[in-house]
Image (cartoon, rainbow, N blue to C red):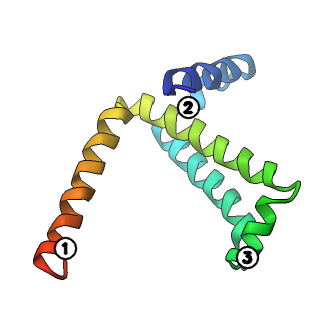
């Protein structure tokens, strides 16, 4: 799904539930952090083998649902803040590549 489709679906549910006024930058950022914490509950105290087994089990859908929640809140937060995520991602990837090159060429960061 494209970001705009995600936001449209998110907004549709918000409108049906009367939640639009709650979708401020602060509230969305807080909700995003809660969703990340819910994802982390699936991984806490597990090693890589346990996580691999989890993702092969019927509980993998729960992890996928948390990732979907995270993406929805992130897309909505970006929209509220007026951030074009395509532009932001391209800029950040370019910065990371530049930094990686500096570390390789120049030694330690």
Count of numbered badges drawn on the protein: 3
Q: Does 57 sit left or right of 20 as displayed? A: right
Q: Residue at x 80, y 68 (%)?
A: 53
The mark lying in front, picked from 2 and 1, is 1
**Disc 3: CA contacts within 10 A as few (<14), some (14-19) or many (>=20):** few
Q: Residue at x 19, y 82 (%)?
A: 108
Element under disc 2: loop
Element under disc 1: helix
Above or below for 44 versus 28 = below
Badge 1 or badge 3: first in the primary sequence: 3
Q: Residue at x 63, y 26 (%)?
A: 10
Above or below for 51 versus 14 = below
Element under disc 3: helix
On the image, numbered disc 1 is attached to which residue? 103
Q: Residue 60 location in percent, x, y? A: 79, 54
Query: Of 41 and 22, which appears nearest the observer?
Result: 41
Estimate the spatial distance between the alpha carbons at disc 1 and disc 3, rounded to whole Å: 31 Å
Badge 2 or badge 3: first in the primary sequence: 2
Asked whether the viewer can see residue 98, the reply is: yes
- For this orientation, the residue located farthest to the right is 58
Badge 2 or badge 1: first in the primary sequence: 2
The mark lying in front, picked from 2 and 3, is 3
Q: Residue at x 30, y 50 (%)?
A: 93
Q: Quadrant of the N terminus?
A: top right
On the image, numbered disc 2 is attached to which residue? 23
Q: Residue 18 location in percent, x, y? A: 69, 21
Q: Does 76 sit left or right of 47 as displayed? A: left
Asked whether the viewer can see residue 83, the reply is: no
Residue 49 circle label: 3
Q: Quadrant of the C terminus?
A: bottom left
Estimate the spatial distance between the alpha carbons at disc 2 and disc 3, rounded to whole Å: 38 Å
């Amino acid at each position: 799904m494209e970001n705009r489709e995600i936001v449209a679906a998110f907004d549709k549910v918000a409108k049906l539930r009367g939640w639009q006024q709650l979708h401020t930058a602060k509230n969305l950022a807080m909700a995003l952090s809660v969703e990340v914490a819910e994802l982390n509950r699936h991984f806490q105290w597990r090693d890589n083998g346990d996580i691999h087994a989890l993702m092969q089990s019927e509980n993998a859908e729960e992890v996928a649902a948390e990732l979907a929640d995270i993406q929805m809140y992130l897309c909505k937060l970006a929209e509220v803040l007026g951030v074009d995520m395509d532009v932001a991602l391209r800029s950040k990837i370019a910065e990371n590549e530049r930094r990686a090159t500096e570390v390789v060429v120049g030694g330690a960061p």
